[in-house]
Image (cartoon, rainbow, N blue to C red):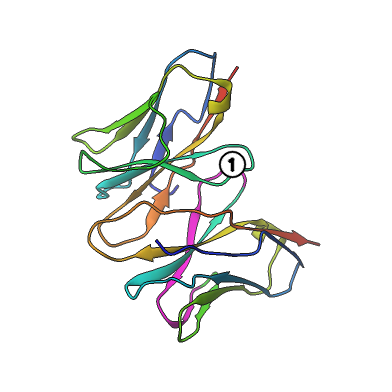
Amino acid sequence: LAKTTQPISMDSYEGQEVNITCSHNNIATNDYITWYQQFPSQGPRFIIQGYKTKVTNEVASLFIPADRKSSTLSLPRVSLSDTAVYYCLVEGRDTGRRALTFGSGTRLQVQP
Amino acid sequence: DSGVTQTPKHLITATGQRVTLRCSPRSGDLSVYWYQQSLDQGLQFLIQYYNGEERAKGNILERFSAQQFPDLHSELNLSSLELGDSALYFCASSDTAGGYTFGSGTRLTVV
């Protein structure tokens, strides 16, 4: 499984754009990059998934360069409610569904 | 509501006891995964079931066991409980190609 590396913590203010970068140097050809968000005492929640280039949904954007060795989760205009832990995962799309391996995640603190 | 139901939400028990945590997966999902998250720790994968069969094991202690029933709900049994077993236990489910959906967890406190 490809190992991911992301910052332990980040601080931001309300209304700012937050970019969290994740490194996954050993990503395999059939791997997808997925980001999850976790609030205290709640289960992780799927945010966005991508394979290459750029993916955007109503919550976030995901930027993946051509070599796919890193990815950047972009949260536009964060609010206090975006304070959470964000996990970057690399998920293989081979046969069967393997369990997700979570790293330490990035703890985002949004201040007023 | 994520569609994955975990019961109970909270559980307080004494050391040495045995408890059972229950998980009902999202409708149509065949895979169930159990995770443990201790205070301020990451999510540790315990075990996975797929359509009633054990698929993968992670860092699950021998005192812990699980099963998935024909109706696809799953139970995680924790025995000979120790103080260090106090944690949030999450269940997740997935279908063959879609995303993973997590339940809201069971908070276990061992006193």
Q: Position of residue A64 (x, y in %)?
A: 49, 80
**Rendered residue at 43%/64% (across/down):** A2
Residue that mark 1 sits on: A41
What residue sits 69% from the left and 75% below the top? A17
* Residue located at (57% from left, 24% from top): B109
In the image, A2: left or right of B10? left
Q: Quadrant of the N terminus of chain A?
A: bottom left
User: Which quadrant would residue B45 be assigned to in this image?
Assistant: top left
Residue A61, how many percent across, how many down? Answer: 54, 76
> In this orientation, which residue lies closer to the viewer: B100 or A30?
A30
Residue B47 coordinates in the image, percent (x, y): 35, 40
| Farthest residue, direction bottom | A66
Q: Is residue A43 magenta?
A: yes
Q: Quadrant of residue A59?
A: bottom right
**Neighbourhood count class around disc 1 (C-alpha, 10 Å): few under 14, some 14–19, many 20 upward:** some
- Which segment is the magenta one? A40-57
Q: For numbered disc 1, what is the local secondary structure?
A: loop
Query: Looking at the picture, which amino acid does disc 1 mark?
Result: Ser
Q: Is residue A47 above or below residue B61?
A: below
Is A38 above or below relative to B71? below
Q: Residue furthest right?
A: A112
In the rendered image, residue A55 lying in the magenta stretch gets the answer yes
- What is the chain identity of the residue bearing mark 1? A
The picture places residue B55, in percent across and down from the top left corner, at 26, 44
Describe residue A98's horizontal placement relative to residue A19 as left or right: left
Using residue B53 as the reference point, say whether residue B77 is left or right of it: right
From the image, which quarter does the C terminus of chain A lie in? Answer: bottom right
Compared to residue B55, the image places residue A109 above or below, namely: below
Q: Nearer the viewer, residue B4 or B68?
A: B68
Q: Residue drawn at (28%, 62%), measured in percent from left and top?
A: B97
Residue closer to the observer: A27 or B104: A27
